[in-house]
Image (spheres, rainbow, N blue to C red):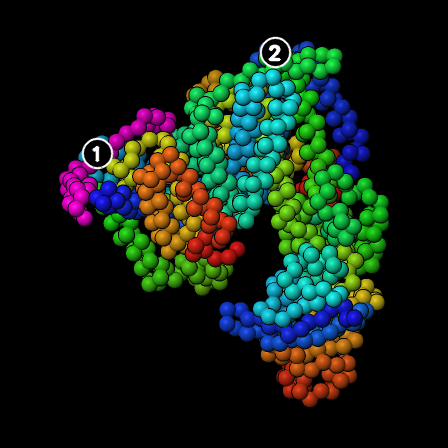
Amino acid sequence: MARSHNPVSRFGLWAVFVILAVLPLILRGYQLRLVTEVIIFSLYAVSYNLLLGYAGLLSFGHAMFFGTGAFAVAILLEHFAGLPLLLAVTLATAFTTATGFVVGCLLLRVKGTPFALLTLAFNALFYAIAVKWSSLTGGDDGLIIDPPQLDLWLLTLDPNKGPDFYYLSLAILGPVILFCWYFTYTAMGRTVLLMRENEDRMRFLGYNTLLARLSLFTLTAGLAGLAGSIYSLFFAFVSIDAISIETTTTVLLMTFIGGTGHFAGPILGAGVFIYLQNFLSELTENWPLIMGVLFILMVLFTPGGLVGIIKGAAQWTASRRKTPDLRKGAKNRHAHSGS
Amino acid sequence: MSDIAIFFLHGLAYAGLLFLVSSGLTLVFGMMSVLNFAHASFYMLGAYFAYWLLQITGNFWLALLISPLMLLVIGALVERFLLRKVHVLGHVHELLLTFGLAYIIDEAVKLIWGTNPHAIIISGFLAHTVNIMGVTYPVYRLFVFGVSMALGLFMWLILFKTRIGIIVRAAVEDSPMVGSLGINVPLVFMGVFSVGAALSGLAGVTAGPLLSVDPGMAGAILVDAFVVIVVGGMGSLGGAVLASFIIGELQSFGVLLFPDFSLALIYMLMAVVLVIRPEGLFGEKQ
Amino acid sequence: MPILEAKGIHKDFSGLEVLTGVDFQLAAGERFAIIGPNGAGKTTLFNILSGAFSPTRGNVLFKGEDISRKPPHLRNRLGMSRSFQITNVFKEISVFDNVLAGVRSREGLRCHYLRRPFKNRGLLERTDEILMQVGLENERDTPAHELAYGQQRALEMGITLSTAPDLILLDEPTAGMSRQETEDAVQMIRRVTESKACIIIEHDMNVVFSLADRISVLHYGVILACGLPEEIRNDQRVKDAYLGQDNQ
């Protein structure tokens, strides 16, 4: 049950931490920017998977929160000169969280397919607002941001420098992603999972499932908003693309390619997606078509995503090494059951 | 006064188009519990096929006939080789599949026909105007409304007055039972899905001369069609008729009265329905 | 004061009157069975007591508080718990986590964003205790759907007990069981409901007569007779309405 006691995963965590810390010494310029992008989209995808993989809520509108965070930080920095960077990010995240709460109050009145449909409709509404309210959002031209320097006690980080921004995003988003991982073991994290399994029974065990769902939805909105705000600081620019259905599709593809059945799935998916996109877009303009076909193939043939393939392969090698233990295999299939 | 008449007629034409799009969507959802996110993309394909057929044959009526048939085939193939495969994995995967399909179609359309808008030019009596309620009005817009009315009536007759309708509705209620009575249930589902696709194709052809044929047309209609089925109640044909009318007129008069907020009106309507009656006007409680 | 009191419960479903004025009282620690022929309204009454839906008219008082229109989760928090006739467990989740869900709910550890249930020794011990009570201590890590039918029923019972209720509502706890399984289940129910109030809806007369302290017979939406098992066994009206025609 307590995976944190597993020495292998603890060692793996430290290894990842050390590698991430020294990465700017190895990678330069564009390569480092790609890694930064992966970190940003990892949080976006992890927040999405808390909805899809853990709570079983299929949303086609996660970009409305990503985009709200992205615009909020840009607008704040434009209108309040001298606003400290971290305060701007905090305010943008808070604003997105509040937005998520309001939207959630409306959307969570329905479940299942109607919920999926409404998330898409609301995403379209947010997009339309961003286009129409051009005095605030810059409309089709977008907004250019001049991210202020970040002065900490000892060091000063300049968001316009690649390595500085890398460390900045790692320092902010890394702990948040770790919290999300921790969250899956908390009372609320487990409750969300149990509700996906059998919401009706949860009600008869004293759980206010409506409130729990709203609470989770609000959390994931806030997380997506945080990712969005760092995203627009990273590019020092935000366009209406950030709040479009395409950006929802992006997170959906990332999460699904990586696999919804494991916490690390969306992170893996974000990495694979960004590097694949980077690779394909150099070959052809029609890379979205290839992504789409890849996505359909995965829906058809590997519903567990890359993590599902890895798990399957691990099980296969394990079963070859020793006599098959059926019970163990059964447990692995239910990664979420926390065995 | 004549302004109001024109905007009312505009509203009717748009309502007709909305019903053409949402009827197929709501038919498939009501019968198969699958929300087809690719429906608007099928609609767009219908319009592009019509454009292509017009270039070859120059006959709009032929396009109006053949384009839906092409979509019928596409719908059957999609159901047989894609949708049916993920059915066992549950609704989430069905939704993901149709969503991915929409994404692919939208990209493929850009690849094949480019991103520039095309126009479908109609000729003959459809291109004329007619004097109605004291105003001169294009025949084609009335034609759109007429087609949607005829379709609505036709669907109602098929579903509720014929043996086919009874079989389809029974297959939805209790597929194992109907299956054991010797009805080929998968075939029924394939039929329903491909008819839904054909309806979207019909809507696409009809929309062609009214709007421009461009890669953004799917996204533009999708949300309006979604609002129609949310307001009307998911899976309810009667609800789709009423909601199409309300939203068509709201859209039309919204442009007249509050040009900047016409879109907001529709969303406000949807929000109000959600708060008061989440299952929609004619929908069943979850 | 009775722990549960039903006062003039009416329920109609769009014109169809299923319950037409049901009254009864239940004392703390009493095992109470509701029987009746098919279509008498037992399930409807059960659903009204447990909160699945509200009565059209009438009131349900639990520990003196009117709960007629309270949602299920609030009823549970007041100390009421129900089982399901069709096994209603968390299928993909381990037996232990199934029961832990209720145990931590009782302690208010439902939606906490920081505290982890598996770090709370008290909760884990309480969960193991319940598993022991229902005889599933050897299956704690098995996913619920891999259990045999009888074990799933035991888990159903374990989940029902997990919120440490003062009143337990059992919906046909032995449905679909073999004779041996039924006997074991009756033993278990007797053990775990010791000194707790309990309402049982059941078809199996042997189960009812061996478990219940008091029995009510529901017939066409009203209570026809109410009394000790012996009284019910000898009641002519009950025989006519129920035992005579259908003694399962």
Q: Position of residue B157 (x, y in %)?
A: 31, 59
When the figure is inspected, residue A153 is found, relative to residue B273, above or below; the finding is: above
All told, the count of numbered labels is: 2
Q: Is residue A234 magenta?
A: no
Which chain hosts label 2? A
- For disc 1, the marked residue is B121
| Marks 2 and 1 on same chain | no
Q: CA distance from mark 2 to mark 1?
A: 55 Å
The percent position of residue C176, horizontal first and vertical second, equals 68, 67
- Does residue A174 appear to the left or right of C127 in the view shown? left
Q: Quadrant of the C terminus of chain A?
A: top right
Q: Which residue is mark 2?
A: A161
Name the secondary structure under disc 2. loop
Residue kind at label 2, given as amino acid type: Lys
Find residue A174 and name its label. Answer: none
Foreground: C123 or B109? C123
Percent x, y of residue A132: 42, 30
The amino acid sitting under disc 1 is Ile
